[in-house]
Image (tube, rainbow, N blue to C red):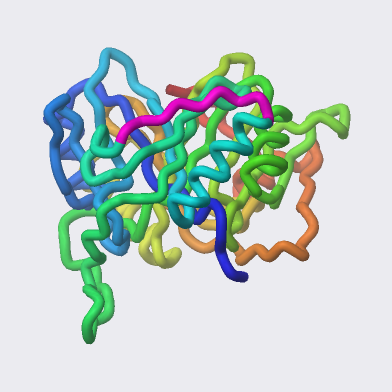
Amino acid sequence: MAMSGILRPGHAQIRVLDMEESVQFYTQVMGLMETGRDSSGRVYFKCRQEHDHNSVVLRQADHAGMDFFGFKVLDQATLEELDKKLQAAGVKTERIPAGEMLETGERVRFQIPTGHTIELFSEKKCVGSVCGYNDPDVDVIDGPGIRPVRMDHALIYGGDIDGNLKLFTEVLGFSLVERVKLEDGSTDLGTWLTCSTKAHDLAMVRHSEDAKLHHVSFMMESWEQVLRAADLMSRNRVSVDIGPTRHGITQGTTIYFFDPSGNRLETFAGGYQWYPDMPPITWSWEEVGRGIFYHDRKLNEAFLSVLT
């Protein structure tokens, strides 16, 4: 499928409580590569196979969570077109000038019905992956920590996920891949959306509080690398929520765990390839436990209640 419009998740700005401790965690435990620091004190990172300058930005604050989640679009013309579509749909947008984030071009920022801040951008400096572009070797895990392939997706919590679904599918061109129904059989508890051929690029769950982050996810290449990540988490005494296990929804393998500030992260591998001719998958309320955690077939309390 030729990709146009929104290409993929591009960056997440995460609030942390102690920058020094967080940088140590994201470099030595997560294995991300620090790519810069700006005058406001933010620290920038990329994953080993990412080509853009940054995908994770840390900002020190007095409470944890996510400031915004950004998607990269094909080019400047696409950015302009999507900005017009958002405004035509009644969404107020803001232009963030190029350079406000290191090595990142102009961004279009807006708020979605659940109160989360989303950004679109087309330009970010290409710094290359660990393999390079000329006669490259294959990628091997040769640095410290878990070393994920890329920042992959986010799961957000809030009230009006129906409004989110309408905005992302009808205005921004996302597709609905999977959904979970509440006990009434008609109301969505959660939806999983894609802008690519992945099983999901953004997911959302209905919740009484708006603008909440459940997790930011990092892609691993295999189940074996998820298990390796589990060993490293145990060695480094990382707080683990659940896993290693498998999802029924998306069919990926997973570990949920927390950074030192209490932000939940995920290592994720697998999941199926999605194409536009595939109908959405629906999970019933009775099977939601198996949908989220296929092996245990039940949810734990922390997974449902701990948010930032």
**x and y percentages locating residue 36 in the rendered image:** 14, 43
Which residue is at the front of the view, 1 or 271? 1
| Quadrant hosting residue 167 | top right
Q: Is residue 25 above or below residue 113?
A: below
Asked if residue 232 is among those painted magenta in the image, a careful observer would answer: no
Q: Is residue 187 left or right of residue 152?
A: right
Q: Which quadrant of the figure contains the N terminus?
A: bottom right
Residue closest to the eye, 205 or 88: 88
Instruction: Decide whether residue 94 is among the magenta residues.
Output: yes
Whether residue 34 is visible: yes
| Residue 8: % across, % down | 48, 53
Specify start and end residues of the magenta stretch as a single range: 89-97
Across and down, in percent, residue 58 comes to 25, 32
Above or below for 261 versus 259: above
- The tally of labels here is 0
Task: Specify whether 33 is left or right of 193.
Answer: left
Q: Residue at x 53, y 37 (%)?
A: 155
Q: Residue at x 57, y 15 (%)?
A: 209
Outermost residue to the bottom: 135
Position of the C terminus, as image quadrant, is top left
Instruction: Between residue 140 and residue 58, name the one nearer to us.
Output: 58
Q: Locate residue 268, reporting x and y percent.
A: 46, 54
Q: Would you place residue 294 above or below residue 274 in this image?
A: above
The answer to whether residue 255 is seen in the rendering is no
Q: Residue 264 sits in which quadrant? A: top left
Image point (56%, 54%), residue name: 5
